[in-house]
Amino acid sequence: MPPLLFYLFAALSLGFGLMVVLSRNPVTSALSLAMSFVGLAALFISLDAYFIGTIQILVYAGAVMVLFLFIIMLLDIKEEAEKRSSLGAIVGAILVASVLSVQIATVCSSLSHSKQSVADSALKLQEAGAEMTASGKSLATITKDLAAGELPDTKLMGLTLFSQYAFHLQVIGLLLLVGTVGVVVLSKREKEVAP
Amino acid sequence: MITLNHYLIVSGILFALGFAGVIARRNIIIIYMCLEMMLSAANLTLVAFSRFNLVDGLPDYTAQALVFFTITVAAAEVAVGLAIIVALFRSKQSVDVEAVTKLQG
Amino acid sequence: MPDQETSSLPTLLLLLPLLTALVILLGNKVLKGASVALSVFSAAVCFIISFILLGTQDSSPILLPFLEVGKFRIAIDALIDQQSRGMMFIVTSIGLLVHLFSLGYMKEDEARVRFFGSLSLFMFSMTGIVLAGNLVMMFIFWELVGLSSYLLIGHWFEKPSAAEASKKAFLTNRIGDFGFMIGILMLFMANHGDVSFLGLKSSFAEGPLHEIAKSNTTFMMLAALGIFMGAVGKSAQFPLHVWLPDAMEGPTPVSALIHAATMVAAGVFMLVRCSFVIEASLSAATIIAWIGGLTALMAALMATQQNDIKRVLAYSTLSQLGYMVMAVGLLAIQVSGEHHEAGPGHPAMFHLYTHAFFKAMLFLGSGAIIYACHHEQDIWKMGGLMKHMPVTFATFAIGTAALMGVPGLSGFFSKEAILGLAFEVKNPSGSPLFWVGVGTAMLTAFYMTRMFVVTFFGKPRTENAHHAVEAPIIMIFPLAVLALLTLISPIGPVARLLQAMEPKHAENHPTVMIASIAALIVGVGAGIFLYRGKDKDPLNIKLFANKFYFDEIYAVIVQVCQDGLAWFVTGLERLFVDGLVARLPAFIATRLGSAARVLTGGQLQSYTFLLGAGVLIVIYLVIFVLPHLGH
């Protein structure tokens, strides 16, 4: 990925992220968050994580954002509904955010392989495909793609999830079910107790 | 060239932004959005490490599986959290966190 | 090496009443009436054992090991000599008779199971005191006796006066016990941890205490007075005498057993046991003799104006106890520095024995009268009881005569012995104390005549007295036995059987004889002259009737001390507690609190901020500080 595009998407993500925090209007915040996530998804794709990038847009920018907007509309929150935050909270927030950023930057810069670029750690698709074929642990469709010099990202993701993490996937499915039931219970209007 | 460091710093700044929003904002829905932002920032770190720590010449899909789970849990969490916000709004008629002082000792 | 028989008997003697008390007090719901029988049975067995013990040799067996710290050993051991054998006989015989009497007297009492349980507890404690072979063991049982006395005085605790009296007795005794403990500890220190009577005795004869008695007279005096403090509390000597008259709120059998014959005599018993301590300090002996004399005289004066039959007897008891204490002091003065055996013929013990029998009888007799008169205790509401209660009258007459010291009866001999001792003592204190003794004897004759005449002669003054009938046989029997004991106790063979009762100073001095008989005649004559056929008291001496205002004086002293202390403490509290301890930290805490309230005000924002700050600090410490510390 050209550096220019990286900076563009990074700026998109961070800029709209800042908008989320600063905007007085909840709807603006929600839409900015969606844009921020689009930038983030682009960064994912730049890291050859096509599947994650796609569901980032589908789940967050699609489903979750709609949910947020839906709630904002439902509760009819006005722009002026929110009181101004106290100076202390703002100062505290800036302080914590800046110190945290500096700390993270310091730690990351000191990592041994943080200077690696994408080119330094290029994918070795053919070799990986050959090894997989040799060990016989993989599927024909994946090795065929790898041999053709393409990264079958979604297929590899699926392989990982349904073989290595099959049980965890079941648990996550259950979690979603519980979440659904929980939402129904929480949203149900309590019955008026007869006097 | 774009290095791992670039991605990590972007992720760190996004996380710090989200945290600042959680501290500074009073609208509970926006606090929620900031939380989602922080989760996504963490996801970026995971994906970056997965790409730069190659396993047999391929990205580390274990990390990406973790990201997949995080997104799923976050989605469920948003659904439940928003339901709680709705319930809270019903009782307090407000989405201001100052209205919620039950935690006061 | 004590032989098997003598060491198992005292163990049984000591533990049987304890077991009985435990069984009764723990199982009173199950046992009910059986527990009363059990208590009487235990008293009877104790009596038989002590009777057997009378014929045994001196011994000092260890019954139970109790406390062992390094070289320091305290055991539950028994010192069985003439003194404890005689005393044991008194305690168990009167105890048994009182148990029998109580069967009748307490027949209608709801809580008589508790009563008999406490009575057994008392028997246990008293046995412990009498058998005790060392001061620590004696102190333990000393306190137990105080406890059982408290329980028994407060038996009718629904009556506020009884509850008050039990508290008063308990607290007053505490003051004395405190001194007793200090005295024990002083001896303990001086004699290197050996507080057994035999050890102390030999140490006084030739040992560390002998040296101390010679070199440090102040120490010895304080130790002796500390021991004496215990007796002051328990034997109700001036100035701690105030509890005994109030203790008459307890059931009358208890008054007879505890507050006339045994427990109050424990103080005297202990003083005689420790007579070697007192003999080591002339000044302490003098103080003790004078306090005894003062108590004897003062109590006799107070007794002349009391209207409650039991209170008259209580003051009489006080007076007689004063007599005994005076005798202890006088004998100590006499033998001071010479260290010869005080032993079996101690006049104080002799008077204790004779007094125990006739005073127990008088109390039981008064109990029978009170019972017959439907719990009426005022002598001015009685009268003419001679016709209605002939047996009680007869025994009461014997008791009164013995107490007054009518020649030929036990009281005469023992009083004679004490007066003779006072007469013999070659000391400036001897002569005045002799006349104090004579005066007390005269007053005794006077107030006993007053009570006797008012109660038994003349016409019945109330309906209750008119309809009085003789007490049931179970109550008459102990009276008769005690009367018999009173009559025979001074006779040679009986006195020799009880060994200890043989007076040491048996020689008769004409002066003493004449003085005491004269005192008797004057007292009785004045009593008959003043009270014959009277319906109310012709004398009215407020000072005596109100017990020299001791209770009031103590109340004022306590109040003044309390108020002063309270004022002082309030000042201290205002300055230190309110000011430095309460206000200052409160101020700091308020400030801190209002500062911290921002952080814990239940606001999500501040919590998040704290969370973030905490995370930052942790990151800082883990990433940036720890590596530089070499981790």
Image (cartoon, coloured by chain):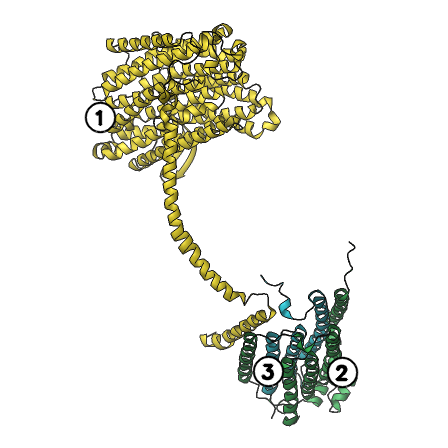
Chain colours: A green, B cyan, C yellow
What residue is drawn where x is 44% and y is 14%?
A: C361
Q: Select label 3 or label 1 by which is in front.
A: 3
What secondary structure is marked by label 1? loop
Residue C358, position in %: x, y?
41, 14
Asked if residue C474 is positioned above or below residue C190 in the image, the reply reads above
Badge 3: chain ID: B
The answer to which of A34 and A123 lies nearer the viewer is: A34
Residue labelled with disc 1? C337
Q: CA distance from mark 3 to mark 2?
A: 32 Å
Residues packed near mark 2 inside 10 Å, few (<14), some (14 to 19) or many (20 plus): some
**Do discs 1 and 2 belong to a common subunit?**
no
Q: Chain of mark 2?
A: A
Looking at the image, which is closer to me, C199 or C190? C190
Same-chain status of marks 3 and 1: no
Instruction: Kindly identify the amino acid type of the residue bearing the numbered disc 2.
Output: Lys
Q: Nearer the viewer, residue A184 or C308?
A: C308
Mark-to-mark CA distance, 3 and 1: 101 Å
Residue visible at 69% across and 75% down in the picture: B70
- Which chain is indicated by disc 1? C
Type of amino acid under label 1: Gly
Residue at numbered disc 3 = B13
* Left or right of C528, for residue C622: right
Q: Tell me the element at label 2.
A: helix
Residue A13 drawn at (x, y percent): 65, 85
Residue at the (38%, 9%) spot, across then down: C401
Residue C292 x %, y %: 31, 23
Task: Find residue C234 and report its image quarter.
Answer: top left
Packing grade of label 1 (10 A; few <14, some 14-19, many >=20) is: some
Residue C527 vertical placement versus A141 (above, below)? above
Q: Is residue C47 left or right of residue A167?
A: left
Q: Nearer the viewer, residue C126 or C360?
A: C360
Residue holding disc 2: A155
